[in-house]
């Protein structure tokens, strides 16, 4: 079972206290965007074996959305960070690099 | 739903007693917790993260980074609410009487920790959870919050709409014969 530390209330919450929110760091393309961008925003998702970034919500707790970096293969959690950011903090990236040298995910590495 | 309205919650005497507490009033306060207005509203000191604090005539609990819950006797709710509105003035914040939207249950007995541990994914071992702490979590399949008023008493808050579910699962877990004697 996954256990994430909620960056807002500090609780080490297990999966049953959380709700999954899909892939992290999506850029929204709305009205006025090209069909291609809109399709990408709506449908195109990563499906990696390894490092992945996701959104989760501490729904049975403080109710806040946060980001999590984890490995889809080993279920190892690299860390969690707040939602008010466009990319993972350097500290999280460093932690991943230490364990998965040469990793990349979308435009991050 | 007449069924919900007429639902009754007779005190249950298992190895831990379960009873509904209709005397507690609740006010939700949302806003920037470090702002002057909120500080004024509930008194100088605000509870720390995940804590519940005894203040004058009320208890103040930290619910999330932008939310506090004030617990007080039901008859004081209207006055307190008006006081809060006054001290907040024009500051952007929410003050709402949620007493009727929630149900409060009291568990009493030496094994209360165990009954909570059966239902919630929380480490209830002595030393890991104690008085002064407010924990939002789930009980069975519903969201809830609880705190310990003493080492043998737990208060649990859940939505009124699921009070019957909460009452029933608490009674099942507190039934005699289901003791685990984990921490006694």
Image: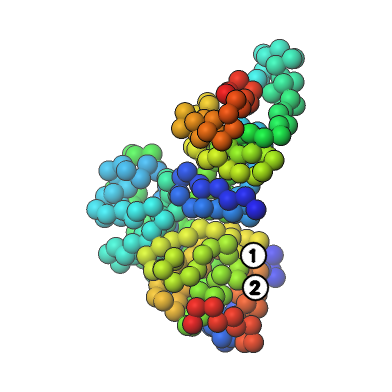
User: Which numbered marker is on residue B169?
Assistant: 2
The secondary structure type at the circle numbered 2 is helix
- Tell me, yes or no, if residue B97 can be seen here: yes
Residue A44 in the image: state x and y as whole percent. Answer: 74, 25
Residue drawn at point x = 61 percent, y = 27 percent? A103
| Mark closest to the chain's N terminus, 1 or 2 | 1
Place of residue A1 in the rendered image (x, y in percent of width and height, measured from the top left):
65, 53
Q: Along the line of sight, which residue is nearer the eye, B18 or B24?
A: B18
Picture layout, residue B58 above or below residue A58: below
> Measured from the top left, where is residue B70 in percent x and y?
39, 59
A83 or A77, which is in the foreground?
A: A77
Q: Disc 1 to disc 2, how far (Cα)?
A: 8 Å
- Asked if the residues shown at circle 1 and circle 2 are in contact, with their CB atoms under 8 angstroms apart, the answer is yes
Circle 1 Cα neighbour tier, 10 Å, few/some/many (<14 / 14–19 / ≥20): some
Q: Measuring from the top left, give residue B88's x and y in whole percent.
A: 32, 45
Q: Residue at x 67, y 14 (%)?
A: A33
At horizontal 29% and vertical 49% (from top left) the residue drawn is B39
In the displayed structure, would residue B96 be above or below residue A31?
A: below
Which residue is the site of mark 1? B140
Quarter holding the N terminus of chain B is: bottom right
Mark 2 neighbour class, 10 Å CA radius: few under 14, some 14 to 19, many 20 or more: some
User: What chain letter is assigned to the residue under label 1?
Assistant: B
Depth check, front residue: A44 or A2: A2
Image quadrant assignment for residue B26 = bottom left
Q: Visible in this render: residue B175?
A: no
Q: Secondary structure at mark 1?
A: loop
Tag 2 subunit: B
């Amino acid at each position: 079972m996954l256990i994430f530390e909620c960056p807002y209330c500090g609780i080490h919450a297990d999966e049953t206290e959380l709700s999954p929110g899909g892939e992290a760091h999506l850029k929204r393309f709305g009205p006025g965007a090209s069909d291609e961008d809109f399709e990408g925003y709506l449908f195109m998702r990563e499906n990696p074996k390894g490092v992945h970034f996701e959104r989760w919500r501490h729904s049975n707790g403080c109710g806040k959305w946060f980001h999590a970096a984890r490995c889809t293969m080993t279920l190892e959690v690299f860390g969690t960070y707040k939602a008010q950011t466009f990319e993972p903090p350097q500290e999280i990236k460093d932690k991943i690099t230490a364990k998965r040298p040469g990793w990349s995910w979308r435009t991050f590495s | 739903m007449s069924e919900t309205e007429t639902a009754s919650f007779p005190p249950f005497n298992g190895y831990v007693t379960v009873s509904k507490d209709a005397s507690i009033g609740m006010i939700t306060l949302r806003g920037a917790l470090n702002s002057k207005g909120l500080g004024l509203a509930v008194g100088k000191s605000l509870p720390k993260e995940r804590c519940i604090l005894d203040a004058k005539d009320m208890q103040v609990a930290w619910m999330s980074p932008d939310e506090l819950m004030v617990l007080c006797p039901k008859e004081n709710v209207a006055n307190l609410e008006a006081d809060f509105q006054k001290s907040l003035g024009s500051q952007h914040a929410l003050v709402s009487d949620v007493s009727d939207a929630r149900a409060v249950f009291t568990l009493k007995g030496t094994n209360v920790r165990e009954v909570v541990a059966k239902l919630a994914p929380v480490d209830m071992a002595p030393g890991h959870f104690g008085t002064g702490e407010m924990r939002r979590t789930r009980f069975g399949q519903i969201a809830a919050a609880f705190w310990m008023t003493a080492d043998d008493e737990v208060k649990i808050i859940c939505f009124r709409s699921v009070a019957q579910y909460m009452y029933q699962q608490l009674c099942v877990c507190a039934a005699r014969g289901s003791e685990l004697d984990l921490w006694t």
